[in-house]
C-alpha cells in the first residue's frame, strides 16, 4: 500500500511540466519592443525598456535608487544562444551579462543571470 502511494506521488511530481525556456525567437517575439518590470527584493518593480533597435534603458528613480547608485542608464541588448544579453554604460561597471529566461505564464517570467543570480519579471506593454 505505501509503495503504491509513493509511486503515485512520484509519478504526479515528475509529470509536472518543467518551465518552458525562451528561445531566441521567443525573446524577439515576447521581450523585444516591450517594457519589462523586474521584481525587486524590497518591493516594487524596476522597469527596463528593450527597444527594437538594440538599445536598452532603465530608470530606478521611482524606487529611490538615486541615493545608492546612478538611477538610470542606457546600453545595448543582443541575443546569444537563446539567451538575452545586455551591457549598460555604468551599471555593473559596464560588464556584459546574459540571462536564461523561463516562461511562468503569459505575463511573467523567471530569469537566471550568468553569475547564478535569479529573479522574476513581469512582461509589460509594448513601447
Image (cartoon, rainbow, N blue to C red):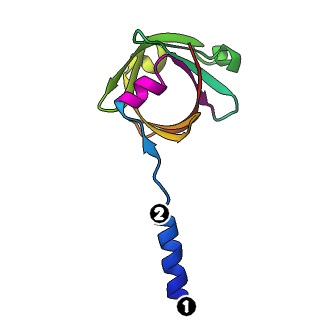
Q: Which residue is mark 1?
A: 1
- Callouts 2 and 1 close, C-beta under 8 Å: no
| SS type, badge 1 | loop
Q: Is residue 27 above or below residue 15?
A: above
Instruction: State the image coordinates of residue 41 (x, y, percent, origin top left).
Output: 64, 35
- Asked if residue 25 lies left or right of residue 120, the reply is left
Q: Which residue is mark 2?
A: 15
Q: Which residues are magenta?
A: 25-40
| SS type, badge 2 | loop
Residue 27 appears in which quarter of the rendering?
top left
Residue at image position (45%, 52%) is: 18
| Residue at the limit of the structure toward the bottom, as seen here | 1
Task: Indicate the quadrant containing the N terminus: top left, top right, bottom left or bottom right.
Answer: bottom right
Question: Which of the marked residues, 2 or 1, is nearer the chain's N terminus?
Answer: 1
Instruction: State the image coordinates of residue 29 (x, y, percent, origin top left).
Output: 44, 25
Residue at image position (47%, 55%) is: 17
Amino acid at each position: 500500500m505505501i509503495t503504491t502511494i509513493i509511486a503515485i506521488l512520484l509519478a504526479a511530481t515528475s509529470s509536472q511540466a518543467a518551465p518552458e525556456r525562451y528561445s531566441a525567437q521567443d525573446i524577439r517575439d515576447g521581450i523585444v519592443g516591450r517594457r519589462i518590470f523586474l521584481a525587486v527584493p524590497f518591493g516594487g518593480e524596476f522597469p527596463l525598456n528593450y527597444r527594437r533597435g538594440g538599445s536598452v534603458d532603465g530608470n530606478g528613480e521611482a524606487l529611490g535608487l538615486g541615493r545608492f547608485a546612478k538611477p538610470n542608464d542606457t546600453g545595448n541588448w543582443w541575443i546569444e544562444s537563446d539567451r538575452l544579453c545586455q551591457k549598460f554604460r555604468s551599471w555593473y561597471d559596464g560588464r556584459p551579462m546574459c540571462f536564461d529566461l523561463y516562461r511562468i505564464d503569459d505575463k511573467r517570467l523567471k530569469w537566471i543571470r550568468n553569475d547564478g543570480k535569479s529573479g522574476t519579471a513581469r512582461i509589460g506593454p509594448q513601447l
